[in-house]
Image (cartoon, helix red, strand yellow):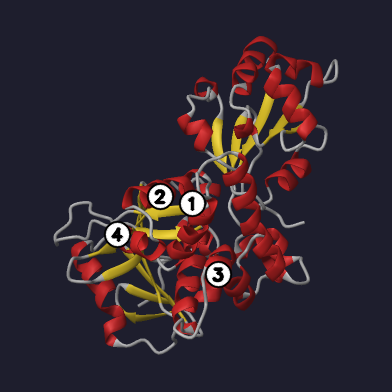
Amino acid sequence: MFNRLPGPVPQASFFLLGPRGTGKSTWLRSCFPEAVFLDLLDDAVFRALSARPESLAHLVPPGHTGWIVVDEVQKAPALLDEVHSLIESRGWRFVLTGSSARKLKRGGANLLGGRARIRTMHPLTAEELGPAYSLSHSLRFGQLPTVYVAPDPGPYLEAYVGTYLREEVMQEALVRNVGAFGRFLQAASFSQAGVLNLTRVAEECALPRKTVESHFDLLEDLLLGTRVPVFQRRARRRMSQHPKFFFFDVGVYRSLRPKGPLDTPEEIDGASMETLVFQELRAHIAARSLGYDLYFWRTVDGLEVDFVLYGEAGLVALEIKRSAHIREPDLRALRAFKADYPMARALLLCGVERRTYREPGIELWPLASALQSLGALLSGEVPAADA
């Protein structure tokens, strides 16, 4: 059992959203051992509640005053009206989990009138993994909980991707042609950690551009992918307008990514390293309520900073390099960003052995130790290194 980051248990009803396999149910059973659990992936429970949402109260034992967990609530959005009513009339407390936000966002679902917070769960972080953490393992298989306990994570990841295609796409009829959607997923994997070019992706999977755009929307609704926008606040340079794209976990990305003689390990490993930092950033921002929004920075002439965090907590720019040998060109983008935003904290996560300064204003961090200390680093508990 890994200790998760979500922090203090809420005292009022809340949504807990996250992709399948991130450990939502395990965490809830640990935090709410006396709760009533209703799993909508159970056919009998799903049929009963989707046909008669008002029967929800009858599935709760008489006199129960604790929490009620409804797993995969997106499968029956109409149930939320009944949940809302029971919160108002009986003061019951619910945890509503979901691995898809599509029906909740687009189906006019009752989100409990703002009475329930929305929390998210992501793959494990280096901090949560503790002594079990291995940078090489994470870069190869990602950080879903099962890949850190399974004797052979590869088949699990292949089945994981297949499960989403089969259950989320086929059963809910979210796309008309599942085969074409499978080709799209592979084409999208070539855009991992890169600037998204919809026209190029459409050409690679032989689909109309509008269809490809709707498929990227679908990935975000299924919590499988994210488009990261360009940071343009008070920009002093001409900025790119296209977002970057990431699948939510390194292992899922690598399972989808086709490999062959034209695909170099350096290319795949570079995207994997950036993805690992991406998923760690998202997890810490959400779990610690840091208030950062996540961006990247790219000028029209090609200067790029991998990630920019902006919010009330400050402004942080992060660049990721595999090598321990940092050359002048590796610092060019961070220097330009610092020139435009001198108040920013600039971090270069790379293969160096210890934390140091390459020059005033730009900190060099060993990638592995930076990820293990990322929460403290982002929350300001780790000050800037001495020049």
Going by the image, does 234 lie left or right of 188? Answer: left
Tell me if residue 361 comes above or below residue 107 in the rendering: below
Three-letter amino acid code of the residue under disc 2: Tyr
Q: Quadrant of the N terminus?
A: bottom right
Between the residue at mark 4 and the residue at mark 2, the CA separation in whole angstroms equals 31 Å
Residue 308 place in picture, x, y as percent: 35, 60
Between the residue at mark 3 and the residue at mark 1, the CA separation in whole angstroms equals 24 Å
- Determine whether the residue tagged by mark 1 lies in a helix, strand or loop: helix
Q: How many residues crowd around disc 2 within 10 Å: few (fewer than 14), some, or many (20 or more)?
A: many
Sequence-first tag of 4 and 2: 4
Sequence-first tag of 3 and 1: 3
Q: Residue furthest right?
A: 62
Between the residue at mark 1 and the residue at mark 4, the CA separation in whole angstroms equals 32 Å
Q: Nearer the viewer, mark 1 or mark 4?
A: 4
Between the residue at mark 2 and the residue at mark 1, the CA separation in whole angstroms equals 6 Å
Between the residue at mark 2 and the residue at mark 3, the CA separation in whole angstroms equals 28 Å
In this figure, which residue is indicated by the disc labeled 4?
A: 199
Three-letter amino acid code of the residue under disc 3: Arg
Q: Nearer the viewer, mark 4 or mark 2?
A: 4
Sequence-first tag of 4 and 3: 4
59, 258: nearer the viewer: 258
Three-letter amino acid code of the residue under disc 4: Thr
Q: Answer yes or no: do the residues labelled 2 and 3 have beta carbons within 8 Å?
A: no
In this figure, which residue is indicated by the disc labeled 2?
A: 292
Q: Answer yes or no: do the residues labelled 4 and 3 have beta carbons within 8 Å?
A: no
In this figure, which residue is indicated by the disc labeled 1?
A: 285
Q: Answer yes or no: do the residues labelled 2 and 1 have beta carbons within 8 Å?
A: yes
Query: Which numbered disc covers residue 254?
Result: 3
Q: Nearer the viewer, mark 4 or mark 3?
A: 4
Q: Answer yes or no: do the residues labelled 3 and 1 have beta carbons within 8 Å?
A: no
State the count of labels.
4
